Amino acid sequence: MMKRWLKKRKWLVLSLAAMTLMGAQTAAAAEGGMEAIGTKFGIWSGGKEVKTDKAPVLIDGSTYVPLRALGEALGKQVEWNEWTQSIRLKEMPKVAAVHEWKNPGTLVGSLKEGGFSGLIHLPGDPADVFYTLADRGPNGEFGKDKLRTFPNEAYVPRIYKIKAAGGTIEVLETIKLHLPAGKTDKFSKTAELTGLPNLEGSDEVPYDGSGTKKLAYDPDGLDLEGIAYNPTDDTFWLSDEYRPSVLQVKRDGTVVGRYVPQGAKEQLVAAGAQTEIYDILPAVYAKRIPNRGFEGVTISPDGKYLYASIQSPMAVPDKKTGEASRNMRILKMNLAAKKVVGEYLYIAENADSFTNVKQKDVVISDLSALSTDVLLVDERDKNSGKEAQIKRIYRADFSAATNLLGTEHSDNLEKLTLAQIKEKGIVPAGKELIVDVAKLGYPHEKLEGLAVVDKHTIAVVNDNDFGVDSYDGQGQLKVNGNPTQMYIIQVGEELK
Protein backbone atom coordinates (compact mmCIF):
# COMPACT_ATOMS: atom_id res chain seq x y z
CA MET A 1 0.00 0.00 0.00
CA MET A 2 2.89 2.34 0.79
CA LYS A 3 4.36 1.83 -2.70
CA ARG A 4 1.05 2.64 -4.33
CA TRP A 5 0.73 5.81 -2.23
CA LEU A 6 4.24 6.96 -3.11
CA LYS A 7 3.70 6.50 -6.83
CA LYS A 8 0.67 8.77 -6.76
CA ARG A 9 2.59 11.70 -5.35
CA LYS A 10 3.00 14.61 -7.77
CA TRP A 11 5.41 16.54 -5.61
CA LEU A 12 9.11 16.23 -5.10
CA VAL A 13 9.40 14.48 -1.78
CA LEU A 14 8.63 10.87 -2.59
CA SER A 15 9.27 9.66 0.93
CA LEU A 16 7.78 10.04 4.41
CA ALA A 17 9.56 10.85 7.63
CA ALA A 18 8.51 8.86 10.65
CA MET A 19 8.05 11.07 13.70
CA THR A 20 6.28 10.42 16.99
CA LEU A 21 4.09 13.46 17.63
CA MET A 22 2.21 14.61 20.71
CA GLY A 23 -1.22 13.06 20.37
CA ALA A 24 0.05 9.96 18.59
CA GLN A 25 -1.24 7.73 21.36
CA THR A 26 -4.72 9.04 20.71
CA ALA A 27 -4.32 8.38 17.01
CA ALA A 28 -2.94 4.93 17.68
CA ALA A 29 -6.21 4.01 19.31
CA ALA A 30 -7.79 4.13 15.87
CA GLU A 31 -8.45 0.80 14.25
CA GLY A 32 -5.40 -0.78 12.53
CA GLY A 33 -3.92 -0.38 9.06
CA MET A 34 -3.17 3.04 7.50
CA GLU A 35 -5.53 5.83 8.42
CA ALA A 36 -5.42 9.53 7.60
CA ILE A 37 -5.34 11.48 10.85
CA GLY A 38 -5.17 15.06 9.54
CA THR A 39 -8.63 15.82 10.94
CA LYS A 40 -7.87 14.43 14.40
CA PHE A 41 -5.25 17.02 15.41
CA GLY A 42 -3.08 19.65 13.84
CA ILE A 43 0.68 19.96 13.47
CA TRP A 44 2.10 23.17 14.88
CA SER A 45 5.52 24.84 14.58
CA GLY A 46 6.52 28.24 15.97
CA GLY A 47 2.95 28.92 17.00
CA LYS A 48 1.60 28.37 13.49
CA GLU A 49 -0.23 25.40 12.08
CA VAL A 50 1.68 23.52 9.38
CA LYS A 51 -0.34 23.04 6.22
CA THR A 52 0.33 19.85 4.26
CA ASP A 53 -1.04 18.73 0.90
CA LYS A 54 -1.02 15.15 2.22
CA ALA A 55 -2.53 14.34 5.58
CA PRO A 56 -0.38 12.57 8.18
CA VAL A 57 -0.97 8.82 8.27
CA LEU A 58 -0.86 6.18 10.97
CA ILE A 59 1.02 2.93 10.32
CA ASP A 60 1.39 0.27 13.01
CA GLY A 61 0.93 2.81 15.79
CA SER A 62 3.45 5.35 14.42
CA THR A 63 2.54 8.71 12.90
CA TYR A 64 4.11 9.58 9.52
CA VAL A 65 4.28 13.16 8.29
CA PRO A 66 5.24 14.42 4.78
CA LEU A 67 8.90 15.35 5.15
CA ARG A 68 8.89 18.35 2.81
CA ALA A 69 6.07 20.15 4.64
CA LEU A 70 7.53 19.41 8.07
CA GLY A 71 11.10 20.26 7.02
CA GLU A 72 10.11 23.59 5.51
CA ALA A 73 8.03 24.44 8.60
CA LEU A 74 11.21 23.97 10.61
CA GLY A 75 13.19 26.23 8.27
CA LYS A 76 14.80 23.46 6.23
CA GLN A 77 15.22 23.13 2.48
CA VAL A 78 14.36 19.59 1.45
CA GLU A 79 15.76 17.84 -1.63
CA TRP A 80 14.90 14.42 -3.03
CA ASN A 81 17.75 13.10 -5.23
CA GLU A 82 16.32 10.73 -7.80
CA TRP A 83 19.66 9.39 -8.99
CA THR A 84 21.06 8.52 -5.56
CA GLN A 85 17.65 7.83 -3.96
CA SER A 86 18.48 10.07 -1.03
CA ILE A 87 17.14 13.11 0.82
CA ARG A 88 19.09 16.19 1.93
CA LEU A 89 17.97 18.76 4.47
CA LYS A 90 19.71 22.14 4.64
CA GLU A 91 19.14 25.50 6.23
CA MET A 92 16.69 27.51 4.09
CA PRO A 93 18.49 30.19 2.03
CA LYS A 94 17.31 33.79 2.45
CA VAL A 95 16.76 36.75 0.13
CA ALA A 96 19.15 39.45 1.34
CA ALA A 97 18.10 42.15 -1.15
CA VAL A 98 16.13 42.86 -4.31
CA HIS A 99 17.36 45.50 -6.78
CA GLU A 100 15.41 46.80 -9.79
CA TRP A 101 16.32 48.61 -13.01
CA LYS A 102 13.91 51.49 -12.50
CA ASN A 103 14.91 53.79 -15.36
CA PRO A 104 15.88 51.68 -18.41
CA GLY A 105 16.74 53.65 -21.52
CA THR A 106 14.40 53.96 -24.51
CA LEU A 107 15.12 51.92 -27.66
CA VAL A 108 12.37 52.85 -30.13
CA GLY A 109 8.83 54.03 -29.48
CA SER A 110 7.64 52.62 -26.18
CA LEU A 111 10.27 49.87 -26.09
CA LYS A 112 12.78 50.03 -23.26
CA GLU A 113 16.14 48.40 -22.65
CA GLY A 114 16.10 45.09 -20.77
CA GLY A 115 16.45 41.42 -21.58
CA PHE A 116 19.22 40.56 -19.09
CA SER A 117 20.19 37.03 -20.14
CA GLY A 118 23.36 36.28 -18.20
CA LEU A 119 25.32 37.51 -15.20
CA ILE A 120 28.86 37.43 -13.87
CA HIS A 121 30.78 38.96 -10.99
CA LEU A 122 34.46 39.52 -11.75
CA PRO A 123 37.19 38.72 -9.21
CA GLY A 124 38.38 41.89 -7.53
CA ASP A 125 35.30 43.95 -8.36
CA PRO A 126 33.16 45.37 -5.55
CA ALA A 127 30.44 43.02 -4.33
CA ASP A 128 27.73 45.16 -5.92
CA VAL A 129 29.26 45.41 -9.42
CA PHE A 130 28.39 42.89 -12.15
CA TYR A 131 28.47 42.37 -15.90
CA THR A 132 25.37 41.21 -17.72
CA LEU A 133 24.22 41.10 -21.33
CA ALA A 134 21.04 41.43 -23.35
CA ASP A 135 19.89 38.99 -26.01
CA ARG A 136 18.76 39.68 -29.59
CA GLY A 137 16.58 42.64 -28.70
CA PRO A 138 12.81 43.11 -28.50
CA ASN A 139 10.93 40.53 -30.55
CA GLY A 140 7.44 39.15 -30.75
CA GLU A 141 5.13 36.66 -32.44
CA PHE A 142 2.68 38.22 -34.89
CA GLY A 143 -0.62 36.78 -36.06
CA LYS A 144 -1.92 33.24 -36.19
CA ASP A 145 1.28 32.06 -37.88
CA LYS A 146 3.36 33.50 -35.03
CA LEU A 147 5.74 35.34 -37.34
CA ARG A 148 8.94 36.35 -35.55
CA THR A 149 9.09 40.13 -35.51
CA PHE A 150 11.95 42.51 -34.71
CA PRO A 151 10.44 45.95 -34.00
CA ASN A 152 13.92 47.34 -33.32
CA GLU A 153 15.72 45.70 -36.23
CA ALA A 154 18.84 47.83 -35.80
CA TYR A 155 19.27 46.71 -32.18
CA VAL A 156 22.89 45.97 -31.29
CA PRO A 157 23.58 43.09 -28.82
CA ARG A 158 25.38 44.49 -25.80
CA ILE A 159 27.15 43.93 -22.51
CA TYR A 160 26.28 46.05 -19.49
CA LYS A 161 28.46 46.84 -16.51
CA ILE A 162 26.01 47.43 -13.67
CA LYS A 163 25.87 48.35 -10.01
CA ALA A 164 23.15 46.77 -7.87
CA ALA A 165 22.74 48.57 -4.55
CA GLY A 166 20.10 50.31 -2.47
CA GLY A 167 17.24 48.60 -4.27
CA THR A 168 18.23 49.88 -7.72
CA ILE A 169 20.26 48.72 -10.72
CA GLU A 170 22.45 51.39 -12.29
CA VAL A 171 24.14 50.95 -15.67
CA LEU A 172 27.77 52.05 -15.35
CA GLU A 173 28.79 51.21 -18.92
CA THR A 174 27.17 49.91 -22.11
CA ILE A 175 29.44 47.89 -24.43
CA LYS A 176 27.95 47.23 -27.88
CA LEU A 177 29.31 44.28 -29.85
CA HIS A 178 31.10 45.01 -33.11
CA LEU A 179 33.41 43.53 -35.71
CA PRO A 180 37.16 44.29 -35.78
CA ALA A 181 38.28 47.48 -37.52
CA GLY A 182 37.88 47.36 -41.28
CA LYS A 183 34.97 44.91 -41.34
CA THR A 184 31.32 45.71 -42.03
CA ASP A 185 28.24 43.79 -40.95
CA LYS A 186 26.10 42.70 -43.91
CA PHE A 187 22.83 43.99 -42.43
CA SER A 188 23.80 47.05 -40.39
CA LYS A 189 26.31 48.32 -42.99
CA THR A 190 28.51 49.31 -40.04
CA ALA A 191 30.90 47.46 -37.74
CA GLU A 192 28.07 46.96 -35.21
CA LEU A 193 26.35 43.58 -35.08
CA THR A 194 22.61 42.88 -34.95
CA GLY A 195 20.33 40.41 -33.19
CA LEU A 196 18.83 39.03 -36.42
CA PRO A 197 18.81 35.33 -37.39
CA ASN A 198 21.73 34.01 -39.45
CA LEU A 199 20.60 31.58 -42.10
CA GLU A 200 17.55 30.91 -44.23
CA GLY A 201 16.10 27.46 -43.68
CA SER A 202 17.65 26.72 -40.30
CA ASP A 203 16.57 29.89 -38.46
CA GLU A 204 13.27 31.72 -38.00
CA VAL A 205 12.20 34.08 -40.78
CA PRO A 206 12.67 37.67 -39.49
CA TYR A 207 9.93 40.26 -39.98
CA ASP A 208 9.69 43.93 -39.13
CA GLY A 209 7.61 45.16 -36.20
CA SER A 210 4.39 45.22 -38.24
CA GLY A 211 4.72 41.58 -39.24
CA THR A 212 4.27 42.50 -42.91
CA LYS A 213 7.81 42.94 -44.23
CA LYS A 214 10.49 40.27 -44.33
CA LEU A 215 13.90 41.38 -43.14
CA ALA A 216 17.24 40.18 -44.46
CA TYR A 217 19.19 37.56 -42.54
CA ASP A 218 22.43 38.57 -40.83
CA PRO A 219 25.07 35.80 -40.84
CA ASP A 220 26.86 37.63 -38.02
CA GLY A 221 23.68 38.19 -35.97
CA LEU A 222 23.67 37.02 -32.37
CA ASP A 223 21.11 35.86 -29.82
CA LEU A 224 23.24 36.15 -26.69
CA GLU A 225 22.30 34.23 -23.54
CA GLY A 226 25.33 33.81 -21.27
CA ILE A 227 28.51 35.61 -20.23
CA ALA A 228 31.78 34.35 -18.73
CA TYR A 229 35.17 35.91 -18.02
CA ASN A 230 38.66 34.55 -18.64
CA PRO A 231 41.15 36.05 -16.15
CA THR A 232 44.17 34.79 -18.11
CA ASP A 233 43.63 37.16 -21.06
CA ASP A 234 40.97 39.59 -19.78
CA THR A 235 38.31 38.61 -22.35
CA PHE A 236 34.64 37.78 -22.13
CA TRP A 237 33.12 34.62 -23.58
CA LEU A 238 29.48 34.72 -24.61
CA SER A 239 27.00 32.00 -25.56
CA ASP A 240 24.70 32.30 -28.58
CA GLU A 241 21.54 30.37 -29.41
CA TYR A 242 21.50 30.78 -33.18
CA ARG A 243 24.10 28.34 -34.48
CA PRO A 244 24.69 27.61 -31.54
CA SER A 245 28.06 29.21 -30.82
CA VAL A 246 30.38 30.64 -28.20
CA LEU A 247 32.24 33.88 -28.82
CA GLN A 248 35.40 35.45 -27.48
CA VAL A 249 35.00 39.21 -27.03
CA LYS A 250 37.39 41.95 -25.92
CA ARG A 251 36.48 44.34 -23.13
CA ASP A 252 35.55 47.00 -25.69
CA GLY A 253 33.05 44.69 -27.43
CA THR A 254 35.23 43.58 -30.37
CA VAL A 255 34.37 40.01 -31.37
CA VAL A 256 37.63 38.08 -31.59
CA GLY A 257 36.17 34.78 -32.76
CA ARG A 258 32.99 32.73 -33.04
CA TYR A 259 33.16 28.98 -32.35
CA VAL A 260 30.51 26.93 -34.15
CA PRO A 261 29.64 23.27 -34.85
CA GLN A 262 31.58 21.56 -37.62
CA GLY A 263 29.94 22.27 -40.97
CA ALA A 264 28.44 25.61 -39.96
CA LYS A 265 31.44 27.72 -41.00
CA GLU A 266 30.93 27.08 -44.72
CA GLN A 267 27.28 28.13 -44.49
CA LEU A 268 28.05 31.35 -42.62
CA VAL A 269 30.95 32.34 -44.88
CA ALA A 270 28.85 31.67 -47.98
CA ALA A 271 26.16 33.94 -46.53
CA GLY A 272 28.67 36.75 -46.08
CA ALA A 273 29.75 36.45 -42.42
CA GLN A 274 32.58 38.78 -41.43
CA THR A 275 33.27 37.31 -37.98
CA GLU A 276 36.36 35.14 -37.58
CA ILE A 277 34.81 31.66 -37.41
CA TYR A 278 36.23 28.43 -35.99
CA ASP A 279 34.25 25.22 -36.56
CA ILE A 280 35.61 23.12 -33.70
CA LEU A 281 32.42 22.12 -31.87
CA PRO A 282 30.90 18.66 -32.46
CA ALA A 283 28.69 18.63 -35.56
CA VAL A 284 25.76 17.20 -33.59
CA TYR A 285 25.31 20.56 -31.85
CA ALA A 286 23.88 22.00 -35.07
CA LYS A 287 20.81 19.86 -34.32
CA ARG A 288 19.63 22.11 -31.52
CA ILE A 289 15.91 22.81 -31.39
CA PRO A 290 15.32 26.36 -32.76
CA ASN A 291 15.80 29.00 -30.02
CA ARG A 292 17.28 26.30 -27.78
CA GLY A 293 20.99 26.67 -28.47
CA PHE A 294 23.81 27.46 -26.04
CA GLU A 295 22.31 29.15 -22.99
CA GLY A 296 24.72 29.02 -20.08
CA VAL A 297 28.48 29.55 -20.26
CA THR A 298 31.11 29.75 -17.53
CA ILE A 299 34.87 29.54 -17.11
CA SER A 300 36.70 27.82 -14.25
CA PRO A 301 38.32 30.30 -11.82
CA ASP A 302 41.81 29.36 -13.07
CA GLY A 303 40.84 30.27 -16.65
CA LYS A 304 41.63 26.81 -18.01
CA TYR A 305 38.22 25.46 -19.00
CA LEU A 306 35.02 26.80 -20.49
CA TYR A 307 31.71 25.00 -19.97
CA ALA A 308 28.68 25.66 -22.19
CA SER A 309 25.21 24.20 -21.79
CA ILE A 310 22.54 23.60 -24.39
CA GLN A 311 19.27 25.08 -23.11
CA SER A 312 17.29 21.86 -23.59
CA PRO A 313 17.77 18.41 -25.13
CA MET A 314 18.50 18.59 -28.84
CA ALA A 315 16.56 17.26 -31.84
CA VAL A 316 18.47 13.97 -31.87
CA PRO A 317 17.28 12.13 -33.82
CA ASP A 318 14.26 14.45 -34.10
CA LYS A 319 12.46 17.30 -32.33
CA LYS A 320 9.80 15.03 -30.80
CA THR A 321 12.45 12.92 -29.10
CA GLY A 322 14.30 16.00 -27.86
CA GLU A 323 11.20 17.60 -26.38
CA ALA A 324 10.37 14.43 -24.43
CA SER A 325 13.93 13.93 -23.15
CA ARG A 326 15.50 14.93 -19.83
CA ASN A 327 19.07 14.52 -21.07
CA MET A 328 20.96 17.81 -21.33
CA ARG A 329 24.43 18.21 -22.85
CA ILE A 330 27.19 20.30 -21.28
CA LEU A 331 30.36 20.86 -23.30
CA LYS A 332 33.88 21.47 -21.96
CA MET A 333 36.59 23.38 -23.85
CA ASN A 334 40.31 23.75 -23.12
CA LEU A 335 40.75 27.50 -23.61
CA ALA A 336 44.52 27.49 -24.11
CA ALA A 337 44.27 24.91 -26.89
CA LYS A 338 40.85 26.14 -28.16
CA LYS A 339 39.81 22.49 -28.21
CA VAL A 340 36.71 20.68 -27.00
CA VAL A 341 37.80 18.09 -24.45
CA GLY A 342 34.57 16.88 -22.86
CA GLU A 343 30.84 16.35 -23.21
CA TYR A 344 28.76 15.41 -20.18
CA LEU A 345 25.22 14.42 -19.33
CA TYR A 346 23.14 16.56 -17.00
CA ILE A 347 19.73 15.10 -16.17
CA ALA A 348 16.93 17.65 -15.86
CA GLU A 349 14.09 17.32 -13.38
CA ASN A 350 11.23 14.99 -14.30
CA ALA A 351 8.21 17.04 -15.39
CA ASP A 352 5.92 14.17 -14.37
CA SER A 353 6.77 14.92 -10.74
CA PHE A 354 5.14 18.36 -11.02
CA THR A 355 1.79 19.87 -11.92
CA ASN A 356 1.27 21.67 -15.25
CA VAL A 357 4.91 21.33 -16.29
CA LYS A 358 5.90 19.94 -19.69
CA GLN A 359 9.26 18.23 -20.11
CA LYS A 360 10.17 20.44 -23.08
CA ASP A 361 9.79 23.49 -20.83
CA VAL A 362 12.35 22.34 -18.23
CA VAL A 363 15.55 24.11 -19.29
CA ILE A 364 19.00 25.26 -18.19
CA SER A 365 19.37 29.05 -18.14
CA ASP A 366 22.87 29.71 -16.79
CA LEU A 367 26.07 28.28 -15.30
CA SER A 368 28.59 29.58 -12.77
CA ALA A 369 31.84 27.74 -12.06
CA LEU A 370 32.95 27.14 -8.48
CA SER A 371 36.07 25.14 -9.44
CA THR A 372 37.55 23.16 -12.31
CA ASP A 373 34.93 20.41 -12.07
CA VAL A 374 32.07 21.94 -10.09
CA LEU A 375 29.45 24.34 -11.45
CA LEU A 376 26.25 25.93 -10.27
CA VAL A 377 23.43 25.20 -12.73
CA ASP A 378 20.27 27.28 -13.05
CA GLU A 379 17.31 25.04 -13.95
CA ARG A 380 13.78 26.36 -14.49
CA ASP A 381 10.30 25.79 -15.90
CA LYS A 382 8.09 28.24 -17.85
CA ASN A 383 5.72 29.06 -14.99
CA SER A 384 5.80 32.21 -12.89
CA GLY A 385 4.49 33.45 -9.56
CA LYS A 386 2.52 30.90 -7.53
CA GLU A 387 2.49 28.51 -10.50
CA ALA A 388 6.30 28.30 -10.59
CA GLN A 389 7.68 24.96 -9.42
CA ILE A 390 11.18 24.65 -10.88
CA LYS A 391 13.31 27.71 -10.23
CA ARG A 392 16.37 26.00 -8.82
CA ILE A 393 20.11 26.33 -8.52
CA TYR A 394 21.98 23.06 -8.33
CA ARG A 395 25.59 22.23 -7.58
CA ALA A 396 26.75 19.98 -10.44
CA ASP A 397 29.90 17.92 -9.95
CA PHE A 398 31.57 16.69 -13.15
CA SER A 399 34.62 15.07 -11.53
CA ALA A 400 33.18 11.56 -11.77
CA ALA A 401 30.86 12.11 -14.76
CA THR A 402 31.34 10.04 -17.92
CA ASN A 403 32.99 11.89 -20.81
CA LEU A 404 30.73 11.16 -23.79
CA LEU A 405 32.72 13.17 -26.35
CA GLY A 406 33.16 11.16 -29.55
CA THR A 407 31.37 8.08 -28.19
CA GLU A 408 28.38 6.26 -29.67
CA HIS A 409 26.33 7.38 -26.67
CA SER A 410 26.67 10.99 -27.80
CA ASP A 411 24.95 10.12 -31.07
CA ASN A 412 21.69 9.09 -29.39
CA LEU A 413 21.85 10.63 -25.93
CA GLU A 414 18.42 12.27 -26.02
CA LYS A 415 16.49 9.03 -26.44
CA LEU A 416 18.06 7.15 -23.52
CA THR A 417 15.90 6.52 -20.46
CA LEU A 418 17.21 6.74 -16.91
CA ALA A 419 17.29 2.95 -16.73
CA GLN A 420 19.24 2.70 -20.00
CA ILE A 421 21.70 5.33 -18.82
CA LYS A 422 22.43 3.25 -15.71
CA GLU A 423 22.55 0.02 -17.72
CA LYS A 424 25.15 1.48 -20.09
CA GLY A 425 27.28 2.67 -17.18
CA ILE A 426 26.93 6.36 -18.04
CA VAL A 427 27.44 8.56 -14.98
CA PRO A 428 25.77 11.99 -15.22
CA ALA A 429 26.96 15.08 -13.39
CA GLY A 430 26.10 14.79 -9.71
CA LYS A 431 23.32 17.17 -8.61
CA GLU A 432 22.80 18.79 -5.22
CA LEU A 433 20.14 21.44 -4.57
CA ILE A 434 21.61 24.72 -3.36
CA VAL A 435 18.62 27.09 -3.63
CA ASP A 436 14.96 26.47 -4.43
CA VAL A 437 14.35 30.03 -5.61
CA ALA A 438 10.60 29.53 -6.12
CA LYS A 439 10.31 28.95 -2.37
CA LEU A 440 11.79 32.40 -1.76
CA GLY A 441 8.96 34.27 -3.48
CA TYR A 442 10.70 34.81 -6.84
CA PRO A 443 7.91 36.12 -9.13
CA HIS A 444 9.39 35.82 -12.63
CA GLU A 445 9.21 33.09 -15.26
CA LYS A 446 12.82 33.45 -16.30
CA LEU A 447 15.48 32.74 -13.71
CA GLU A 448 18.01 33.76 -16.30
CA GLY A 449 21.35 35.06 -15.02
CA LEU A 450 23.41 33.51 -12.22
CA ALA A 451 26.59 34.73 -10.50
CA VAL A 452 28.54 33.83 -7.37
CA VAL A 453 29.45 36.90 -5.31
CA ASP A 454 31.25 35.13 -2.47
CA LYS A 455 31.22 31.76 -0.69
CA HIS A 456 27.79 32.41 0.81
CA THR A 457 26.16 34.77 -1.70
CA ILE A 458 24.47 34.20 -5.07
CA ALA A 459 22.94 36.80 -7.39
CA VAL A 460 20.26 36.06 -9.99
CA VAL A 461 18.52 38.25 -12.59
CA ASN A 462 15.43 37.77 -14.73
CA ASP A 463 15.07 38.32 -18.46
CA ASN A 464 12.02 40.56 -18.80
CA ASP A 465 11.97 40.18 -22.62
CA PHE A 466 12.25 43.97 -22.89
CA GLY A 467 8.77 44.22 -21.37
CA VAL A 468 7.25 42.93 -24.63
CA ASP A 469 4.12 40.85 -24.20
CA SER A 470 2.28 40.20 -27.48
CA TYR A 471 0.30 41.92 -30.23
CA ASP A 472 -3.16 43.34 -29.64
CA GLY A 473 -6.14 43.04 -31.99
CA GLN A 474 -4.97 46.06 -34.00
CA GLY A 475 -1.58 44.57 -34.69
CA GLN A 476 0.20 46.79 -32.17
CA LEU A 477 2.92 45.40 -29.93
CA LYS A 478 1.87 45.39 -26.27
CA VAL A 479 4.29 46.32 -23.51
CA ASN A 480 3.67 44.67 -20.14
CA GLY A 481 5.99 46.65 -17.91
CA ASN A 482 7.59 43.52 -16.42
CA PRO A 483 10.67 44.84 -14.56
CA THR A 484 14.28 43.69 -14.58
CA GLN A 485 15.29 42.64 -11.06
CA MET A 486 18.28 41.16 -9.27
CA TYR A 487 17.83 38.94 -6.22
CA ILE A 488 20.74 38.59 -3.78
CA ILE A 489 20.49 35.23 -1.99
CA GLN A 490 22.40 34.13 1.10
CA VAL A 491 23.11 30.42 1.61
CA GLY A 492 24.21 28.76 4.83
CA GLU A 493 26.67 26.19 3.54
CA GLU A 494 29.86 27.35 1.87
CA LEU A 495 29.78 27.28 -1.94
CA LYS A 496 32.61 25.02 -3.08
Image (cartoon, helix red, strand yellow):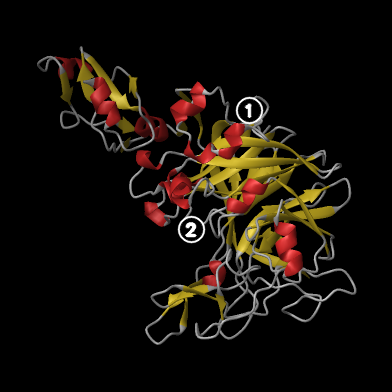
For badge 2, the amino acid type reads His
- Which dot marks residue 444? 2
Q: Disc 2 or 1, which lies upstream in sequence? A: 1
Q: Within the image, what quadrant is residue 260 found in?
A: bottom right
- Which dot marks residue 401? 1
383 or 281, which is in the foreground?
281
Residue 240 image offset from top left, x and y in percent? 67, 58
Identify the residue at image location x=64%, y=80%: 107
Q: Is residue 166 left or right of residue 233?
A: left
User: Above or below — where is 61 with respect to 13?
Assistant: above
Are the residues at dot 2 and dot 1 in contact (C-beta closer than 8 Å)?
no
For badge 1, the amino acid type reads Ala
Q: Count neighbours of disc 2 (C-alpha within 10 A) and say few if under 14, some if 14 to 19, many if 20 or more.
A: many
Badge 1 marks a residue whose secondary structure is loop
Q: Within the image, what quadrant is residue 272 found in?
A: bottom right
User: Above or below — where is 157 with respect to 335?
Assistant: below
Residue 81 image offset from top left, x and y in percent? 47, 28
User: Above or below — where is 312 with respect to 190?
Assistant: above
| Quadrant holding the C terminus | top right
Identify the residue at image location x=50%, y=82%: 211
Identify the residue at image location x=9%, y=16%: 31
Residue 7 image offset from top left, x and y in percent? 29, 29
| Quadrant holding the N terminus | top left
